[in-house]
Image (cartoon, rainbow, N blue to C red):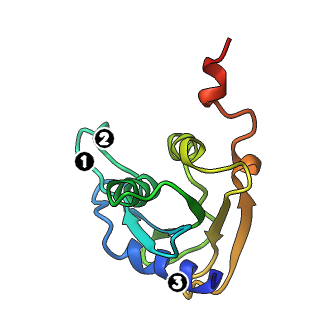
Amino acid sequence: MDKNMLAKLAVKAAENAYAPYSGFKVGAALLAASGKIYTGCNIENASFSPTVCAERNAFFSAINAGERNFECIAVAGVKNGNISGICTPCGVCRQVMAEFCSENFLVLSVKNNEGTEFEEYTLSDLLPFSFGSDNFTE
């Protein structure tokens, strides 16, 4: 897997974001175990509740295509045309990731517009003590 390519695809996906209220555009590029890459962008709504994050958008596209195994996601947050720092997935997106990914699932937080710099985290770094199917056992 080329992490730089995944990071660049996340930056590119942010261009399609619909963020008229916050102005904060987010793009995500999700690598499935099959080798296929699914992208997503955030889509805001005036009533805010129906807003969907880029990461969930990418995951739901992949799941709809039949994917269930994932290796890595890159996330890029863009404000006023620039990436000025890292953007990590929100809590809801982390919980969705926990449903489909191992604790070693890799999250790349893109640090520049070129997609050449990023911070790497595992899902367990970002969501320790996650809630999952094991919580339903007696």
**Picture coordinates of residue 118 (x, y %)?**
68, 75
Residue for point 33% across, 60% down: 65
Residue 59: which quarter of the image?
Answer: bottom left
Depth check, mark 1 against mark 3: the one in front is 3
Residue 138: which quarter of the image?
Answer: top right
Residue for point 60% across, 73% down: 84
Return the residue at label 2.
Answer: 48
| Residue lying farthest to the top in this orientation | 138
Q: Amino acid at mark 2?
A: Phe
Circle 3: element type:
helix
Q: Is residue 72 left or right of residue 15?
A: right
Q: Would you place residue 74 above or below residue 137 in this image?
A: below
Q: Earlier in the sequence, mark 1 or mark 3?
A: 3
Return the residue at label 1.
Answer: 45
State if disc 2 and disc 1 touch (CB < 8 Å). yes
| Residue lying farthest to the left in this orientation | 46
In the picture, the quarter occupied by the N terminus is bottom right
**Picture coordinates of residue 68 (x, y %)?**
48, 54
Circle 1: element type:
loop
Depth check, mark 3 against mark 2: the one in front is 3
Residue for point 39% across, 60% down: 62
Q: Amino acid at mark 1?
A: Asn
Q: Would you place residue 68 above or below residue 135 in this image?
A: below
Return the residue at label 3.
Answer: 8
Marks 1/2: CA distance? 5 Å
Q: Which mark is residue 78?
A: none
Q: Amino acid at mark 3?
A: Lys
Q: Earlier in the sequence, mark 3 or mark 2?
A: 3
Circle 2: element type:
loop
Q: Is residue 85 left or right of residue 15?
A: right
